[in-house]
């Protein structure tokens, strides 16, 4: 599908996403500088916390949601070879999400919503922040509905045929997001907005945190699934080989969705309002979801090995050298997997119920998620952008070598910035502080790491600017209008002729999720209505 | 469905690794009793000054008749009260933390003392401090624009040198 209207529609989503991204990168550099306390003139908690709140919202909600919607529309129309269903509805969803973003951005930027992107009631932001964030999510629900409709349109027209893997993964993500966003939607609609409008005098922060935890873990899979999708459906072809296993990819996506949902309490390990049995249950589930990631690692590396050997690689490791390291998609997957190994190691510590106490709410935690999100996930967003831009704009990429430099510098910058955070976390530095004002000798041991962190931040900002520059130059260039390139999906090495229905549909899995969610969250949520709880009034900050 | 024999082996290996990690966590939690702070206990944060337990005179380090040490602390923007406490090393200490306003979190670097403090709930942690020294007590959850300035101090005193606070209602044979 290379319809000009659809291309414009998809580019609109991606530009909103990357516009949010570059703005948030500038804020990130300001934050590392301010936080270190090395530059006296920058010190300002009110600007810092407004910036951190905005950086979080832009990166975690705006960049991701718009990127995932644009990516999903493109995958749906090209892998199914049918036009996007109901374009007016799709534009409506885009407009609602964009309107919500603006509505939330205004209080954020003027310091009226410095409650961080995790809301933290009973701190109270301006009500338009909550309404804007809700509209962003509501807009994304339009996308979810369109993905599900297109999935079934195709299935109806192609009975008993395996749904293309790219669309299977995208629909899995749409369903995941519907389930995921329900928790935070309940919190915002029944607690935060009524409190902010004065309809309610108090809310229970314990219940609010429980509902937010429902959303807080699976949302990371919502962000990650497009990266995994690219691993499976673009990388093998771009590297010059075949996908090692189509079926195991489906198994991985199903387990991610089903077990990614009922495990949010690993964000509440240190919380007093939930009992240890529930936390242990969620800890168990957390280790179950390491399984699809380990399977993905295997399948992707095996696919790369096929490519490397087809290109003449010999011996145990010879195939690594023969991979096309100068292909942005191939380079990205290698860097992305390396970040996944570093970040995954830290994640095992966070997930470990008791060990987590050592690093809870310290600088270790942003170190971990900047590796997995800023590293693994965003590197693949870059790769997808470099792959899609020439196709969508019908112009060759402005500079391939700039793209390679950008990917390498992003990887190196992220490693430089996050390593000191891990060390600082072990040395006890809290996350979310705007200065190091403690009257303690301990803080002396933090200084050298703060220098390294700042350096990493600048490398990342430089890399982010190169990325935007390359995309903008591509789109604005006056290159020939005749440049046409098609997206190519990887072929599995063993063709999939037929699939059991449970690997080709989600009806069964929705029922399984409903049961698991009831088991994991039923009593923990209902307890607040049976216990003698005391509400908290809203507070400024 | 086609699964390559090598991938099948890897899948079992992956499951084995996850199983090993989960087993260690479960043994620690269920047999050794190492648990995250999960004492589901509610309290009215707006009326702490009227509650028996967290009235001002009861805050800080207290030793009961059996010699058990309990530390009651109130977190409020922007400090932990009392501002300074002293506890013995290598001795079990039970902390009971409450918030008088918003969400806080607290940890003492280089120790296992860490918990969230959610308004409306009592956060209880029992731990011991192996190494004597002066430690900061840091707020680790964003609680407002003065969050950076929210800390207090704890002295961990070698247990042979530690004496119970004089105003503590010490009874029995506690050291």
Image: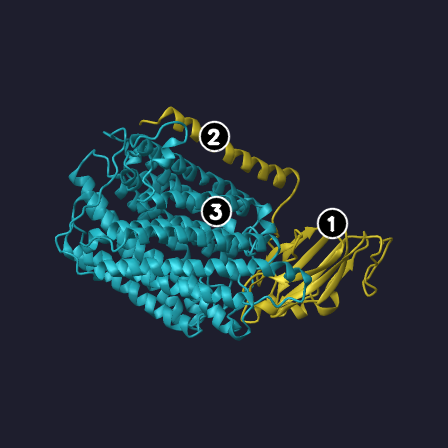
Q: Is residue A122 above or below residue A247?
A: below
Q: In this figure, which residue is indicated by the disc labeled 2?
A: B13
Spatial CA span between label 2 and label 1? 38 Å
Q: Is residue A449 something that shows in the picture?
A: yes
Q: Quadrant of residue A395?
A: bottom left
Q: Quadrant of residue B157?
A: bottom right
Spatial CA span between label 3 and label 1? 31 Å
Callout 1: SS: loop
Spatial CA span between label 2 and label 3? 20 Å
Q: Which chain is cyan?
A: A
Callout 2: SS: helix
Do marks 2 and 3 share a chain? Answer: no
Q: Residue at x 24, y 39 (%)?
A: A164
Q: Residue at x 44, y 46 (%)?
A: A339
Which of marks 1 and 2 precedes in the sequence? 2
x then y, percent, for residue B66: 81, 51
Q: Which chain is yellow?
A: B
Q: Which mark is residue B130?
A: 1
x then y, percent, for residue A440: 68, 64
Circle 2 or circle 3, nearest the eye:
3
Pointer 2 local density, CA inside 10 Å: few below 14, some 14–19, many at least 20:
some
Circle 3 or circle 1, nearest the eye:
3
Q: In this figure, which residue is indicated by the disc labeled 3?
A: A343
- Chain letter of the residue carrying label 1: B
Towards the viewer: A170 or B51:
A170
Q: Is residue A495 above or below residue A195?
A: above
């Amino acid at each position: 599908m290379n319809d000009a209207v659809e291309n414009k529609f998809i580019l609109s989503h991606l530009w909103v996403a990357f516009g949010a991204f570059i703005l948030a990168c500038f804020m990130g550099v300001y934050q590392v500088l301010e936080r270190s306390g090395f530059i006296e003139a920058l010190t300002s908690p009110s600007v810092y916390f407004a910036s951190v709140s905005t950086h979080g919202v832009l990166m975690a909600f705006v960049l991701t949601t718009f990127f995932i919607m644009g990516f999903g529309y493109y995958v749906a129309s090209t892998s199914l070879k049918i036009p996007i269903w109901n374009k007016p509805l799709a534009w409506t969803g885009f407009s609602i999400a964009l309107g919500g973003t603006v509505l939330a951005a205004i209080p954020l930027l003027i310091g009226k919503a410095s409650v961080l992107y995790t809301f933290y009631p009973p701190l109270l932001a301006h009500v338009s922040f909550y309404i804007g964030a809700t509209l962003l999510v509501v807009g994304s629900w339009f996308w979810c509905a369109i993905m599900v409709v297109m999935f079934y349109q195709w299935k109806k027209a192609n009975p008993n045929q395996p749904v293309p893997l790219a669309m299977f993964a995208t629909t899995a993500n749409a369903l995941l997001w519907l389930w995921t966003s329900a928790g935070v939607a309940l919190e915002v609609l029944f607690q935060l907005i009524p409190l902010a409008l004065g309809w309610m005098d108090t809310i229970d922060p314990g219940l609010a945190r429980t509902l937010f935890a429902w959303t807080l873990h699976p949302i990371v899979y919502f962000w990650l699934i497009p990266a995994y999708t690219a691993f499976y459906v673009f990388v093998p072809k771009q590297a010059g080989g075949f996908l090692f296993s189509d079926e195991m990819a489906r198994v991985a996506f199903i387990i991610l969705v089903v077990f990614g949902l009922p495990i949010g309490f690993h964000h509440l390990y240190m919380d007093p309002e939930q009992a240890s049995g529930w936390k242990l249950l969620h800890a168990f589930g957390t280790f179950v979801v390491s399984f699809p990631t380990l399977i993905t690692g295997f399948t992707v590396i095996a696919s790369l090995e096929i490519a490397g050997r087809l290109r003449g690689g010999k011996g145990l490791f010879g195939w690594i050298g023969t991979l096309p390291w100068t292909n942005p998609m191939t380079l990205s997957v290698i860097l992305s997997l390396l970040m996944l190994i570093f970040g995954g190691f830290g994640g095992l510590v966070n997930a470990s119920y008791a060990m987590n106490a050592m690093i809870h709410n310290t600088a270790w935690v942003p170190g971990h998620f900047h590796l997995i999100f800023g590293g693994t996930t965003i590197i693949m967003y870059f790769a997808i952008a470099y792959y899609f831009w020439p196709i969508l704009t019908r112009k060759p990429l402005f500079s391939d070598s700039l793209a390679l430099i950008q990917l390498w510098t992003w990887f190196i910058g992220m490693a430089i910035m996050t390593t000191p955070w891990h060390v600082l976390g072990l040395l006890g530095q809290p996350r979310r502080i705007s200065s190091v004002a403690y009257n303690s000798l301990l803080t002396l041991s933090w200084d050298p790491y703060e220098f390294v962190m700042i350096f990493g931040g600048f490398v990342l900002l430089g890399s982010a600017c190169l990325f935007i520059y390359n995309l903008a130059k591509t789109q604005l260039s006056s290159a020939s209008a005749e440049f046409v390139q098609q997206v190519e999906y990887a072929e599995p090495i063993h063709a999939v002729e037929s699939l059991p229905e449970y690997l080709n549909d989600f009806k069964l899995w929705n029922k399984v999720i409903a049961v698991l969610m009831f088991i994991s969250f039923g009593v923990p949520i209902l307890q607040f209505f049976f216990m003698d709880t005391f509400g908290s009034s809203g507070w400024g900050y | 469905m086609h699964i390559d024999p090598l991938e099948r082996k890897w899948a079992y290996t992956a499951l084995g690794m996850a199983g090993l990690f989960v087993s260690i966590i479960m043994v620690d939690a269920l047999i050794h009793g190492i648990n995250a702070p999960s004492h589901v206990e509610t309290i009215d944060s707006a009326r702490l000054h009227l509650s028996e337990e967290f009235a001002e005179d009861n805050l800080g380090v207290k030793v009961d008749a059996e010699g058990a040490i309990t530390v009651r602390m109130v977190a409020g923007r922007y400090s932990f009260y009392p501002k300074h406490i002293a506890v013995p090393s290598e001795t079990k200490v039970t902390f009971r933390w409450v918030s008088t306003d918003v969400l806080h979190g607290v940890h003492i670097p280089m120790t296992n003392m860490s918990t969230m403090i959610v308004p409306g709930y009592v956060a209880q942690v029992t731990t011991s401090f192996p190494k004597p020294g002066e430690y900061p007590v840091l707020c680790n959850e964003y609680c407002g624009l003065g969050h950076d300035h929210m800390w207090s101090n704890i002295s961990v005193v070698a247990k042979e040198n530690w004496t119970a606070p004089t105003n503590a209602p010490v009874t029995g044979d506690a050291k």
